[in-house]
Amino acid sequence: GSGHDGDLLWTGTTANASAVNFADWHVRVPSGRYVVEAYVDASVATARQATYAIYHAGKVDRVVAAQTSTGWKNLGPFTFAADGADRIRVDDNTGEAGGLGRHVAFDAIRLTPQECPRLQVDTGGGPLNVRPAANTSRAAIGSLADGAVVDRRSTGAGQSVAGTTDWHQIQTPSLVGWVSGAY
């Protein structure tokens, strides 16, 4: 009766070097960029360091998520190749000793197509500051050149700039931060 749609699997966490138990979700979607989410039911799951390994387009990214609150956990956007190798894996060796009595749950995974995965900077000629949060109250952590095209991880509300409160979390090979949607 627990979990998304009333069903889940779970096992105890371990601090072993290798996994004893694991779950694999094989991803079969058309090639493209998707936001990946994992459902967690905290009435069963208590792991604080569950690692989701996302195998996509010939790469693997690992996202650590606490399984301590119920709901969908956003693991981020990923580009899938639809080559038969795309998958998501969670192991029981979270680094949390079995004696702690914690459980890692294997529940539902949701992929949502990301309609606009990339953004082009349009400042009219100057650089665009990248901020650590969706506001201008803290110093810039980097900048993007006018015309730069970057990956968009998410969009959210933040400080109003030039009349818009939309801010985009962007990612480059060396930078993750927020830029105002006004540019």
Image (tube, helix red, strand yellow):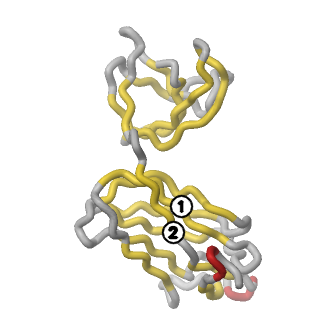
Q: Amino acid at mark 1?
A: Glu
- Residue for point 43% across, 71% down: 88
- Label 1 close to label 2 by CB (< 8 Å): yes
Residue 99, numbered label: none
Residue 113: where, in percent of width, then height?
41, 52
Q: Secondary structure at mark 1?
A: strand
Q: Residues within 10 Å of mark 2 (few under 14, many from 20)?
A: some
Q: Is residue 14 left or right of residue 114?
A: right
Residue under numbered circle 2: 109
Q: Nearer the viewer, residue 7 or 155?
A: 7
Residue 95: where, in percent of width, then height?
60, 76
Q: Nearer the viewer, residue 175 or 151?
A: 151
Residue 37, numbered label: 1
Q: Nearer the viewer, residue 70 or 145?
A: 70
| Quadrant showing the N terminus | bottom right
- Residue for point 34% across, 54% down: 79
C-alpha span from label 1 to label 2:
6 Å
- Compare marks 1 and 2 and give the one earlier in the sequence: 1
Residue 102 image-quadrant placement: bottom right
